Image: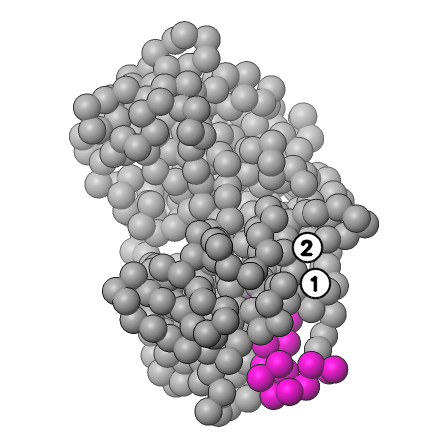
Amino acid sequence: MKHIVIIGNSAAGMSAAEAVRRNDKSVKISMVSEEQYPAYMRLKIAEILMNNLNPEKLFLKPNEFFKQANIDLLPGEKVDRVIPKKNSIILFDKTKIVYDALIVASGRSANISKDVKGANKHGVLGFRNIRNARDIMELVPISNTVCIWGAGIAGINAAYGLSRKNLEIKVITSKERILEGILDEEKARALENSLREKGVEIIFNKSIVEIFGNGDVKAIKLDSGKVIGCGILILDKNLAPNTKFLENTEVNINFGVRVDEFLRSSVENIFAAGDVLSRKASQEECFDLPNSWDRAVNQGRIAGENALKFVQSRTDQMTSYEDIVQNRELRILDLELEAGPAASLAENAADQSDCNQEDI
């Protein structure tokens, strides 16, 4: 029996799995995910903060779906490395899984620059998954101030989500306005005013250079020299592809897993979809925008179909990936906004490289 393994179970991973199963009822499908949860709407995790929402309300599929679809979901498992020459992945618990085709849909994670002192403190968190949201909620009762570094979609959602928690909330951005490149100036200023009405302070044109605390975050220092006390620091910066398990392999990594028109990597039976990939267009290396749900679903479908065609020895029938027009309606919790021609949904200069600057 042929075996297709998928790393990641968000929009791209789930779409890939469904595409494979829709076209073949017998091929074995395994999904490996670091998270304990099945696929869910990542863009809505701020509702966990704002409304104490049960994470199960965000699930795209009930747990029964995977059994019914004969998909082997391995939650809470982390991939240590991929060995392309042996068509296998090794999990951190040393479990070896052999595949005929592999789909990498592991997404991106927020990271902090190595130039920032004290970056490994407890309380420095991303805002990309349910685990992040729950970790933040655990720290809320013992924190007076939350700092959010970055004013992209995730950062603003986190600010809104925490605005009912009787906390001081400070958004720190190196930009001149929030959601720069996503909203025009008028809409951005209106949103800033809405945030201020909810008690959120926005600090423009500043970056963090140091994090203080003996194990736990106690304060941050801005490049202006100002020190701000806080118990939680949420990152919406430096979204980097989750590709550590592909280091020192034959898979070409450049801003992400580099793929061809079929979303196939430099290794013929390894495909990629979603935030983790990069692709070449017009002689430029580029990757797709973080948090672009429709794109991830579309790429997952194509990667799944092509991985299946590969294991069925039908590579001559593989489908070329074509970009889709993005939905320009942007939702930040209870707000609906019309996005403009965006460059990125995260605040990071490196994230401004996209193949089609007219899409978001």
Mark 2 belongs to which amino acid? Arg
Question: Residue at coordinates 51% horizontally, 80% vertically from top-left?
Answer: 100
Identify the residue position indicated by label 2 in the image.
279
Mark 1 belongs to which amino acid? Asp
Is there a contact, CB below 8 Å, between mark 2 and mark 1?
A: yes
The secondary structure that dominates the magenta segment is helix
The CA distance from mark 2 to mark 1 is 6 Å
Identify the residue position indicated by label 1 in the image.
260
Q: Is residue 32 left or right of residue 276?
A: left
Question: Residue at coordinates 44% horizontally, 52% vertically from top-left?
Answer: 244
Question: Residue at coordinates 60% horizontally, 67% vertically from top-left?
Answer: 267
* Quadrant hosting residue 186: top right
Image position, residue 359 (x, y; %): 71, 48
Magenta range is 297-317
Image position, residue 139 (x, y; %): 22, 36
Question: Residue at coordinates 29% horizontally, 71% vertically from top-left?
Answer: 95
Image position, residue 163 (x, y; %): 36, 32
* Quadrant hosting residue 55: bottom left
Residue placed most toward the observer, 345 or 73: 73
Q: Where is 139 relative to 317, above or below?
A: above
* Quadrant hosting residue 323: bottom right
Badge 2 or badge 1: first in the primary sequence: 1
Mark 2: few, some, or many residues within 10 Å (few <14, many ≥20)? many
Image position, residue 108 (x, y; %): 49, 49
